[in-house]
Amino acid sequence: MTASPTPTAALAFAHHDHAHCVGEVLARAEAASLARGARLTPVRRRTLEILLESHRAMGAYDMLDRLAAEGFGKQPPVAYRALDFLVEQGFAHRINRLNAFTACIHPGEDHAAAFLICRACNAVAEAPAARVRAALDAAGAEIGFTVERATVEALGLCPTCRTAA
Amino acid sequence: MTASPTPTAALAFAHHDHAHCVGEVLARAEAASLARGARLTPVRRRTLEILLESHRAMGAYDMLDRLAAEGFGKQPPVAYRALDFLVEQGFAHRINRLNAFTACIHPGEDHAAAFLICRACNAVAEAPAARVRAALDAAGAEIGFTVERATVEALGLCPTCRTAA
DNA sequence: CAAGAGATGTAATATCGCAACATATGGACT
DNA sequence: AGTCCATATGTTGCGATATTACATCTCTTG
Ligand SMILES: [Zn+2]
Ligand SMILES: [Zn+2]
Ligand SMILES: [Zn+2]
Ligand SMILES: [Zn+2]
């Protein structure tokens, strides 16, 4: 266990000490919740854990199945509310293209993210998108548009699937 | 859903000779269809016209209502198929964030687009996104990811609404 | 004309997401 | 302690979005 680096986008497509990265992110989410007075309740915490463990983008109904199997509520709002909370707190992201959610790899920090979705294996990586965001801000500025929130989702091939093909 | 795209991104948020811009774009789509052997049939053509005339992002079911009222089929696939065709041909774009579709302002050309969505008036502008795309390609390349298709959607304030506020 | 491809239409169903309401839980305050 | 209130959790029911499967029609091509 060297240092304790922020999980990087590259990790999403590679093997790694997953249990460790789950614990790391979860601990950060807990700290951030505490710091800002948000309540990381059992359902919410478990929802984040499941997202982290699956290490993929998950649909709300997939999450609902998991939660229901563990004794939480069985109706859609249970999953949607927990997921919405995580998104609001910056602990998870919504991937519009997939109607799905994915855990954030650096929860609590303010950051622009781009999502790289492998069309072959469905892995989703969260990449830093500061430069993408800057280019988008500039494109908006040219016509007087002020960008507040951005959705950037790329479909393509991850290194592994690219090699395989 | 209330939005509005046009020939240049700047025009999207301003008044202009709309009838002319509709004709212009439609003519280009026709030429492109002819050139590549795609069949711009009556439903498809009418769907594109409606998109252009409405000058907004439209949901599939809104489009279906319009088409049904004009004597075309009344079932969802009628709208979805026509819209899918237009998207495939590059005559329209899907705005994932809105579950809606909008006419492309330069149909047939190969281009990277970013969509600027005003959160106040729901107008949608299609902005050139070559630089955004380049930045995204670079972000992917850093971890060996090959970007094939990108979805870039920004939420913010258009010039008009910004001034009003 | 016959055969096949592609387009259009319908019915039925799958998937995604939310509003409304009831109940429970946990502090804050007498 | 007990009351009050905000928040969270659970439910029913519904609305919006999207697709599959199949029937029909229309072109084109030999
Ligand atoms: Zn993130
Ligand atoms: Zn892959
Ligand atoms: Zn376009
Ligand atoms: Zn506006």
Image: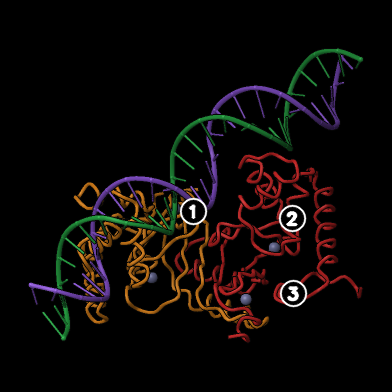
Chain colours: A red, B orange, C purple, D green
| Residue B158 visible within the image | yes
Q: Under 8 Å from ligand 1: the CB of mark 2?
A: no
Which mark is first along the chain, 2 or 3? Answer: 3
On the image, numbered disc 1 is attached to which residue?
A: B162
How packed mark 2 is, by other alpha carbons closer than 10 Å (few <14, some 14-19, many 20 or more), is: some
Chain holding disc 3: A
Q: Is residue B83 left or right of residue B147?
A: left
The image shows residue B43 at horizontal and vertical percentages of: 23, 60
Please give the name of the residue rendered at 51% of the width and 78% of the height, measured from the top-left corner: B148
The image shows residue B7 at horizontal and vertical percentages of: 32, 68
On the image, numbered disc 2 is attached to which residue?
A: A50
Please give the name of the residue rendered at 75% of the width and 60% of the height, measured from the top-left corner: A52
Chain holding disc 1: B
Q: Is A113 above or below relative to B139?
A: above
Q: Under 8 Å from ligand 4: the CB of mark 1?
A: yes
User: In terms of image quadrants, where is residue A57?
Assistant: bottom right
On the image, numbered disc 3 is attached to which residue?
A: A11
